[in-house]
Amino acid sequence: MPSKRRIAILGATGSIGQNALRVIRAHSDQLELVAAAGGSRIAPLAAIAQEFQLRQVGVFEPPIPPGELHGSFPAQTQVVTGMQGLIEIATHPDVDMVLIAVVGTTALLPCIEAIRAKKDIALASKEILVMAGEFIMPMVREHGVQLLPTDSEHNAIFQCLRDEPLRTVEKVLLTASGGRYLNTPVEQLASIPAEEAVLHPNWSMGQKISIDSSTMANKGLEVIEARWLFGLQPEQIEVVIHPQSIVHSMVQFRDGSLIAQLSPPNMSFAIQHCLLYPERACGIDATLDFSQCLTLEFQPPDQDRFPCLRLAFDALRLGHTAPAIFNAANEIAVSAFVEKRIGFLDIPRVIEFTLENLPILKPANIETIIETDQEARRISHQWTVS
Ligand code: NAD
Ligand code: MG
């Protein structure tokens, strides 16, 4: 890399964001953080602005009047707010690559504007492609930018594929830990509390993705994301339960060879791969240790135990607006579950109800998708309060 790659992070205070900061610190000879945004917590953002001497910082929902924010940040750091602020950061003239790591689809418009401004994208927010992959992927090609998958499974597939042509790919196998409830008796699932569902056995992650992992809606979202990232047909995507979370995904080629990517369950590997791509530098976390016994298990998923996964495949096959509806309904259902308004097993019920009560249409443009998202949120919210 001739000069430092200049990075902006949307979601810098979250689980992915914090791991990305560790990568940037360790590779400060090659990477420079120039701008960052977070939700509403000022203190951690101010610490990041101070440490990295940021040019711009974004507070999406400031807890104090925007005019009073600058007092919390270093003098040379420009403070921006709201959606316009996220877009300014994502399109900042001094930024080469934007890491998008905000929960849900909040960063959809900043992502689109970053692509238009010819920024390379490292994408952790899988929900964005689930909602609007049909429109974002052609934009990526049109503007000649890199869209690097940061989700560990898609990063694994990206590494396994290298430059192999799509026609040589038989299928991809997305691995899934199976989450916390892989072996819990089904009759106990109804009474699972949110405080427990948020605890993942292998990964340390944000609240929403942890609950999505418990229901396997997360794997469903990833299946749909894989379709757009790699141009696959629904029948070319398979999910395999792999409780150790060491094989992050696999690609089976037409000749029967299967290529896998392995690393410990730690997001720093995938994040570093994206931020330094195509360079490979020293990793920052412990690697696999083959001097110890290492057992890797694989089993097919139980679709009855995990209806969210079946619903995601249904949405993928239905296509058009169905994946956006699946995503929006899941987001509303997870919020309602966290707020104790619905039970764990109601999450797939909300999704199914919403999919059944909205027409599945071919979206004319991104605005149609945004309207569908809003409508799906309204219908699923009604379910959770009725
Ligand atoms: P998190 O809850 O830990 O962090 C989310 C971050 O987004 C925080 O910095 C929060 O302040 C910020 N944020 C929230 N709303 C915002 C807004 N409107 N504008 C700007 N910032 C906002 O979440 P996470 O686990 O880091 O996940 C982030 C995304 O990455 C999700 O889409 C998730 O699916 C994906 N992802 C996460 C992991 C993981 O290991 N955590 C792995 C793969 C993919
Ligand atoms: Mg993942």
Image (spheres, grey):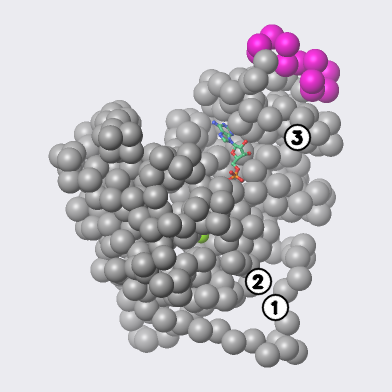
Q: Nearer the viewer, residue 262 or 297?
A: 297
Q: Quadrant of ligand 1?
A: top right
Q: Nearer the viewer, residue 134 or 45?
A: 45
Q: Earlier in the sequence, mark 1 or mark 2?
A: 2
Give the extent of the magenta segment.
65-75
Q: Does residue 365 appear in the picture of this structure?
A: no
Q: Does residue 11 appear in the picture of this structure?
A: yes
**From mark 1 to mark 2, how far is it between C-alphas?**
6 Å
Look at the numbered discs 1 and 2 and tell me whether their residues touch, using CB distance below 8 Å: yes
Q: Nearer the viewer, residue 202 or 21?
A: 202
User: Which mark, residue 288?
Assistant: 1
The amino acid type, in three-letter code, at marker 2 is Pro
The amino acid type, in three-letter code, at marker 1 is Leu
> Which residue lies under the disc numbered 2?
264
Percent x, y for residue 77?
77, 22
Q: Is residue 319 above or below residue 189?
A: above
Q: Which mark is in front, 1 or 3?
A: 3
Q: Which mark is in front, 2 or 3?
A: 3
> Which residue lies under the disc numbered 3?
44
Residue at 41% in and 62% down: 189
Q: Quadrant of the C terminus?
A: top left
Among the 4 quarters of the image, the one containing residue 87 = top right
The amino acid type, in three-letter code, at marker 3 is Pro
Q: Is residue 131 above or below residue 148?
A: above
